[in-house]
């Protein structure tokens, strides 16, 4: 008898921009289902009871990107003028999903805003606005500034270095360029914020080699799959073997998950 496909909870990216949801959510659904799972979208306007009911049927969570920024008050800062508006419904839903995932040991995959959401939930901080190349005087001294938000039309925005021994390293082994003990991976990029201080029981799994921006975090406990990346592998699922490998590793963890006794 064929085992049922693992069900993956995916919150809607935002409660404030339906056009963004219509454009982006299908990409996450496609990647999950192409990798062998069943996507379970979680509406941000559903009651917490209904969200919890759906979540109880899922064996993993995927936290997607969003046009919003997390409320900086949550990590002890006041918003700078470049900070986008918060999305209270998305933050509340992420909190529910993360609490369940950590309580039950469910696999977690975070993407862009999802990485930042995970980090803040684990008491980490964010850089509210990264340096922009356009803001640097044309003096030839801007080589240490990376454009982290060229947008979704640029599939290869900049390289990242993946740390040896990380889950991410294991997932993309043989699919990325050797860089000594590390691996070099070219990624897309659509973010103006980034991890400041990693949260509790999270470790750095990838960085931008030019400016040191943290590009991936992982959970420190080996028994739970927790991987979050600052780029968008769902956008390059069809064109990138590394993106497919990341979703494959996530879905394999979801298939292997069993509820806590």
Image (cartoon, rainbow, N blue to C red):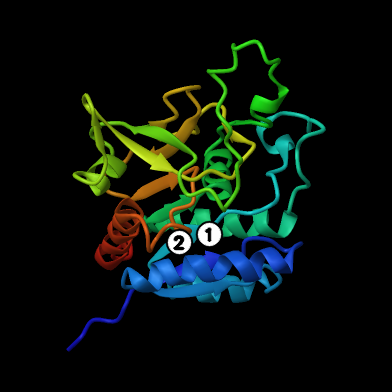
Residue depicted at x 72% and y 23%: 135
Choose between 120 and 62: the one closer to the eye: 62
Visible residue check, residue 203: no
User: Badge 1, how many Cα within 10 Å: few under 14, some, many 20+?
Assistant: many
Q: Is residue 236 visible?
A: yes
Q: Can you name the residue that lies furthest to the right here?
A: 81
Q: Is residue 158 above or below residue 30?
A: above
Mark 2 surroundings within 10 Å by alpha-carbon count, few (fewer than 14), some (14 through 19), many (20 or more): many
Residues at discs 1 and 2 in contact (Cβ within 8 Å): yes
Where residue 208 appears, as percent x and y from the top left, is: 45, 29
SS of the residue at dot 2?
Answer: strand
- Outermost bottom residue: 1
Q: Is residue 23 above or below residue 235?
A: below
**Mark 1 → mark 2, Cα distance in angstroms:** 7 Å
Instruction: Using the rendered view, name the quadrant where residue 5 is placed.
Output: bottom left
Q: Position of residue 87 (x, y in %)?
A: 73, 54
Residue visible at 20% across and 85% down? Answer: 2
At horizontal 52% and vertical 75% (from top left) the residue drawn is: 54
Q: Position of residue 63 (x, y in %)?
A: 52, 56
Where residue 222 appears, as percent x and y from the top left, is 27, 43
Q: Is residue 22 left or right of residue 18?
A: left
Of residues 230 and 225, the one drawn nearer to the viewer in this rendering = 230
**Left or right of 184, for residue 73:** right
Q: Which mark is residue 97?
A: 1
Per the image, the residue denoted by label 2 is 61
Q: Is residue 59 above or below residue 106?
A: below
Name the quarter where the C terminus is drawn.
Answer: bottom left
Q: Earlier in the sequence, mark 1 or mark 2?
A: 2
Name the residue nearer the viewer: 175 or 156.
Answer: 156
Question: In what element is the residue under mark 1?
Answer: helix
Which of labels 1 and 2 is toward the front? Answer: 2
């Amino acid at each position: 008898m064929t085992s049922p496909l693992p069900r993956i909870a995916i919150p809607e990216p935002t409660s404030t921009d339906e056009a963004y949801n219509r454009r982006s959510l299908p990409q996450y659904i496609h990647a999950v289902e192409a990798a062998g799972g069943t996507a379970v979208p979680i509406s941000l306007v559903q009651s917490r009871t209904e969200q919890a009911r759906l979540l109880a049927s899922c064996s993993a969570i995927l936290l997607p990107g969003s046009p919003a920024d997390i409320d900086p008050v949550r990590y002890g800062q006041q918003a700078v003028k470049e900070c986008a508006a918060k999305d209270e419904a998305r933050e509340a839903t992420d909190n529910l999903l993360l609490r369940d995932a950590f309580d039950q040991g469910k696999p977690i995959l975070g993407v862009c805003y999802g990485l930042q959401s995970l980090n803040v939930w684990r008491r980490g901080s964010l850089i509210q606005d990264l340096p922009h190349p356009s803001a640097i005087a044309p003096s030839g001294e801007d080589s240490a500034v990376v454009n982290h938000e060229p947008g979704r039309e640029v599939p290869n925005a900049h390289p990242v270095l993946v740390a040896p021994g990380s889950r991410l390293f294991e997932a993309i082994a043989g699919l990325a360029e050797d860089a000594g003990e590390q691996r070099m991976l070219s990624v897309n990029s659509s973010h103006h914020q980034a991890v400041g201080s990693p949260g509790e029981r999270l470790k750095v799994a990838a960085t931008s080699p030019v400016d040191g921006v943290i590009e991936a975090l992982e959970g420190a406990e080996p028994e739970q799959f927790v991987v979050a990346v600052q780029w968008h592998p769902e956008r390059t699922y069809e064109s990138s073997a590394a993106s497919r490998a990341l979703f494959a590793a996530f879905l394999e963890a979801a298939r292997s998950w069993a509820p806590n006794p």
